[in-house]
Image: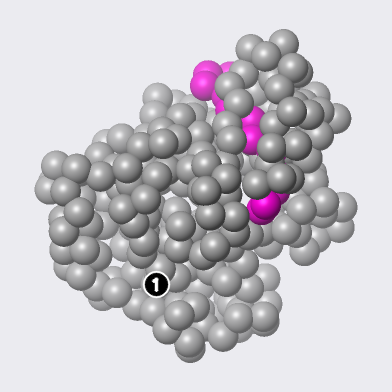
Amino acid sequence: MNAGALHLLGQAAVDDRGLFIAETFGPTFQGEGPSIGRQAVFIRLSHCNLSCGQGRGARWSCDTAYTWDFKTYNPQDPKIRRRVTLDELIAWVLAHPGALVVITGGEPFVQGVALERLVAGLHAAGREVEIETNGTLIPNEAVVAAVDAFNVSPKLAAAGGREVMRIVPAALDAFVASGKARFKFVVCDVAEFMEIAQLVERFAMDEVWVMPEGTSSDAVRQGLRTIAKETLARGWNLSPRLHVELWEDERGR
Ligand code: SF4
């Protein structure tokens, strides 16, 4: 992570006046994983502690790099990053009754204290909340209690970068212990299934999903066909990318 991003990350971690977000969008459909197809509103938080696609060995790129790659994207541009108060965010969600609330990123747990307050506020308002995370930061008890589900997506070697950054045993153990985690792996091909199987066994992951990498409907469809048989054979679940099928890589969908 570059020095500028680290400075911004520090601001985000300690600020209690709200959260840095890239965007809110919806209602739309949850496009991936166990809740696929459900009506949902999304809060996409800024910042990430990983930089998938930029390290050695990377085979795919982060499709939300605008949340964290501030060498490429200007964080002073409000279309890239802006600070929103908790009250504003919760009011926006409450204007969309009934929809599942998905907090995604970036990596939401980078803004840990503010995230905790956001989830608590949404929970108190009676809303169902999922957090999408790369599984490298330990969730605290308050978040575990208030959230309905964690969609944990540990990054494999094909994301690039060092394993010690991508796979954090204490964090993965905590997500498993929460009883609320579903694990979703992005894959390029079946050669990565052994790597997934080792993680599943090592951390006793219960609910496992695999999803093909791809930001076009053609690529995702081809990926699904490539991995379907082996996914069945392993006893795992297969996730399309519904938003890509519907709207390709349009932002805010
Ligand atoms: S963890 Fe997610 S948001 Fe962060 S760089 Fe990787 S793919 Fe992008």
Provide the major secondary structure of the magenta segment: loop
The color scheme shown is one colour
Q: Viewed as shown, does residue 121 lie left or right of 189?
A: left
Instruction: Residue under label 1, please give it.
Output: 20
> Which residue is found at the position 67% from the left and 81% from the top?
71
Residue 208 in magenta stretch: yes
**Start and end of the magenta stretch?**
204-216
Q: Viewed as shown, does residue 130 lie left or right of 136?
A: left
> Which residue is found at the position 40% from the left and 68% from the top?
23
Q: Position of residue 55 (x, y in %)?
A: 80, 60
Quarter of the figure that contains the N terminus: bottom right
Q: Position of residue 45 (x, y in %)?
A: 43, 63
Q: Position of residue 183 (x, y in %)?
A: 55, 31
Q: Secondary structure at mark 1?
A: strand
Q: Does residue 166 appear in this view?
A: no
Q: Position of residue 93 (x, y in %)?
A: 22, 57
Task: Give the vertical position of 96 relative to 202 (above or below).
Answer: below
Residue with the most extreme bottom position: 76
Task: Give the vertical position of 96 relative to 14 (above or below).
Answer: above
> Which residue is found at the position 58% from the left and 75% from the top?
6
